[in-house]
């Protein structure tokens, strides 16, 4: 065999090896991602929006015309995310209400995102690598694979992957990442390829239909144009030159999509946004600084993660967590700017991070000014914002590999591989454990209480939600304790007063429960459920007039509360307000025509008012709906007897005796 033939065969083996790594490395990224999140397949729905989104929501169940119309025309729970609902409709077709299938879809979506991050990291690392390193395809792919794994198996990804109500982050992220890949392909030359550019625009639009949160996308593209694409020139002075105008004009389609979706998102969430008067500019800035540093800190040390990091009731913007965050942010920004020539990738990653994590930057001046909900921050918001850190880790590892390769020997293999193995093993272990936190509501909120009680921000919401779980479970004393803990953190939350009062009613402490119901009503006069509960307690304590007043107030706000209307009609009848009772029963039966008890009580009122014809008709309707209603048979028999219809009355008495005898025989012996 001559030298030329031997060299040719060697090149063939190298190409085969490269083809093998081309398949193996991305396959391992997906496989390890699925393994890290595998416990999620045993999780169920949780009471953190899953109940409202899935258990109590029939509209998403299927992909028929009515379902699709609802998905694309409805702002539900202050969110517009039609494509996300389409995936849930598909899940329902396959799995109905089995949570396993829903978790499987979320896991597969995240696995695909891990694959997209691999190709994105590979492209960015190739642009950052030297010619010699770029030619070493295996090493570059290994580093890109590790960068993708740092993204996909990190514990901060658990919330959007495992919490089904947060799937919009996964689906939006998929189209977002895909759009960036298309843009990078389009921008290979200074004049972009129109097909790849159009694909990027379309995919970005699909990302917004999955979730209206990717409004910073045009700025991310500009950051990529600066580095590593360098399409705006080598210095800031050339960014506004004639050659750079095309780069700026390219962003117009993305900017229009971002601006329109940002405005729509603000309108959709206007009911849950805090105003400037509620938080204030200083508090919003403090929250912004904390959030920016929080994600970096949790990326480095991903422990103590919680589903709820709550804004404190007595929000002090001068508290040490906010001051420290401001100092850290300033020091890091100045330090990376000073080292921009030596470590341009680090500064670029920092800028990308700031651009992605600042929501609605085109609409409002500071992070948090579109504050949504009770949280100071949330793990799910890090899904895309922390992506630059994964790529940056890949850059550092690539340079580490280059440094070792110059020295050669066994150290290259061992020292180059050891950090990667340690990082992957540690992240997989933490993610496996964090995934199980979301197994069910009780496990979730016990974990949240344990974490937040040992943090700067104790969470009234975590105690409140755990109290709800324990109340439904029947652990009344423990539930009451967590409700009281919640009130100690925020005494102005009416739902906590209402639910604590419900526990006290079950514990027979009517006096104390009345105080908490009254406080709930004082805090929110339109709180119809609390008014109805207060009415029930007043009735139980022998205060019918007060109960009637509360029932009426509840129905003014929520006329659809049929149970409250029934209780009002019944109490009016008991207090001899028969005319009003008749009116309320008539309204109740219009809404609930199949209520056996409603027809029966209304019939007895009519009979007591000597309206025999209508009263007996109502009793007959009650018996039509439930023939084995012994009380209705007996009442009807009495009035038939008084009317001289002895034979017909006897039949009803006999039927009542038969029903009562049958009921007694069916009861188990003591």
Image (tube, rainbow, N blue to C red):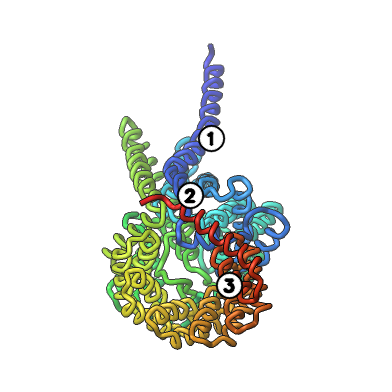
Question: Mark 1 or 2 closer to N-term?
Answer: 1
Specify the label residue 22 is tagged with.
1
Count residues near mark 1 (Cα–Cα under 10 Å), then give few for <14, some for 14-19, many for 20+: some
Q: Nearer the viewer, mark 3 or mark 2?
A: 3
Q: Position of residue 524 (x, y in %)?
A: 45, 83
Q: Secondary structure at mark 1?
A: helix
Specify the label residue 128 is tagged with.
2
Query: How far is mark 3 from mark 2, CA to CA?
Result: 94 Å
Above/below status of 666 relative to 569: above
- In this rendering, the count of numbered labels is 3
In percent of the image, x 37 and y 52: which residue is there? 437
Q: Position of residue 398 (x, y in %)?
A: 41, 44
In percent of the image, x 30 and y 72: which residue is there? 484
Specify the label residue 638 is tagged with.
3
Q: Position of residue 1 (x, y in %)?
A: 53, 11
Question: In the image, 282: left or right of 98?
Answer: left
Q: Position of residue 648 (x, y in %)?
A: 65, 66
Above/below status of 365 relative to 244: below
* Outermost residue to the right: 65
Q: Nearer the viewer, mark 1 or mark 2?
A: 1
Q: Nearer the viewer, mark 3 or mark 1?
A: 3
The quarter holding residue 473 reads bottom left
Q: Secondary structure at mark 2?
A: helix
In percent of the image, x 62 and y 62: which residue is there? 651
Of 307 and 665, the residue lying toward us: 665
């Amino acid at each position: 065999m001559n030298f030329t033939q031997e060299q040719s065969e060697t090149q063939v083996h190298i190409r085969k090896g490269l083809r093998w790594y081309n398949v193996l490395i991305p396959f391992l990224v997906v496989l390890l991602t699925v393994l890290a999140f595998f416990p999620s397949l045993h999780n169920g729905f949780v009471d953190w929006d899953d109940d409202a989104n899935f258990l109590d929501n029939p509209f998403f169940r299927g992909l028929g015309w009515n379902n699709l119309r609802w998905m694309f025309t409805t702002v539900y729970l202050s969110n517009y995310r039609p494509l996300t609902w389409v995936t849930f409709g598909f899940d329902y077709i396959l799995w109905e209400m089995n949570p396993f299938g829903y978790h499987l879809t979320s896991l597969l979506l995240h696995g695909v995102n891990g694959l997209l991050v691999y190709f994105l990291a590979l492209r960015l690392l190739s642009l950052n690598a030297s010619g010699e390193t770029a030619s070493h395809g295996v090493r570059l792919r290994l580093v890109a694979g590790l960068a993708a794994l740092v993204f996909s198996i990190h514990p901060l990804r658990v919330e959007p992957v495992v919490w089904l109500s947060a799937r919009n982050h996964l689906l939006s992220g998929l189209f977002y990442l895909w759009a960036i890949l298309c843009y990078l392909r389009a921008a290979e030359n200074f004049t972009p390829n129109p097909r790849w550019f159009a694909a990027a625009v379309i995919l970005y639009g699909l990302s917004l239909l999955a979730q209206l949160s990717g409004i910073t996308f045009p700025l991310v593209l500009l950051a990529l144009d600066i580095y590593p694409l360098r399409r705006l020139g080598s210095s800031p002075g050339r960014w506004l030159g004639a050659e750079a105008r095309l780069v700026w004009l390219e962003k117009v389609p993305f900017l229009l999509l971002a601006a329109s979706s940002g405005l729509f998102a603000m309108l959709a969430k206007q009911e849950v946004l805090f105003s400037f008067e509620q938080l204030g500019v200083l508090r919003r800035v403090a929250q912004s600084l904390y959030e920016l540093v929080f994600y970096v800190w949790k990326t480095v040390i991903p422990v103590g993660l919680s589903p709820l990091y709550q804004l404190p009731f007595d929000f002090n913007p001068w508290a040490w967590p906010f001051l420290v965050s401001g100092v850290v942010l300033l020091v890091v920004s100045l330090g990376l700017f000073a080292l921009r020539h030596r470590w341009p990738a680090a500064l670029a990653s920092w800028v990308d991070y700031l651009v992605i994590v600042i929501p609605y930057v085109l609409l409002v001046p500071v992070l948090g000014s579109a504050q949504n909900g009770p949280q100071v921050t949330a793990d799910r918001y890090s899904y895309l914002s922390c992506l630059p850190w994964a790529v940056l880790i890949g850059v550092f590892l690539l340079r580490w590999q280059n440094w070792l390769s110059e020295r050669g020997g066994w150290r290259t293999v061992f020292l180059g591989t050891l950090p990667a193995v340690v990082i992957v093993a540690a992240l997989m272990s933490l993610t496996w454990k964090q995934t199980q936190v979301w197994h069910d509501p009780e496990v979730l909120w016990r974990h949240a209480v344990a974490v937040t009680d040992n943090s700067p921000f104790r969470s009234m919401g975590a105690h409140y939600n755990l109290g709800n779980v324990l109340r439904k479970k029947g652990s009344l004393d423990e539930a009451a304790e967590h409700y009281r803990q919640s009130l100690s953190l925020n005494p102005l939350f009416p739902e906590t007063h209402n639910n604590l009062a419900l526990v006290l009613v079950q514990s027979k402490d009517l006096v104390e429960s009345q105080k908490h119901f009254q406080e709930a009503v004082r805090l929110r006069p339109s709180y119809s459920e609390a008014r109805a509960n207060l009415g029930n307690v007043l009735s139980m304590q022998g205060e019918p007039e007060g109960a009637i007043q509360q029932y009426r107030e509840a129905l003014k706000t929520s006329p659809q509360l049929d149970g409250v209307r029934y209780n009002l009609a019944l109490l009016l009848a008991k207090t001899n307000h028969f005319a009003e009772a008749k009116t309320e029963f008539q309204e109740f039966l219009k809404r609930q025509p199949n209520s056996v008890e409603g027809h029966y009580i209304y019939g007895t009122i009519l009979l007591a008012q000597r309206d025999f014809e209508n009263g007996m008709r109502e009793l007959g309707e009650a018996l039509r709906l439930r023939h084995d209603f012994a009380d209705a048979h007996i009442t009807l028999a009495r009035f038939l007897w008084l009317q001289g219809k002895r034979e017909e009355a006897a039949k009803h008495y006999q039927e009542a005796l038969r029903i009562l005898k049958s009921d007694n025989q069916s009861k188990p012996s003591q």
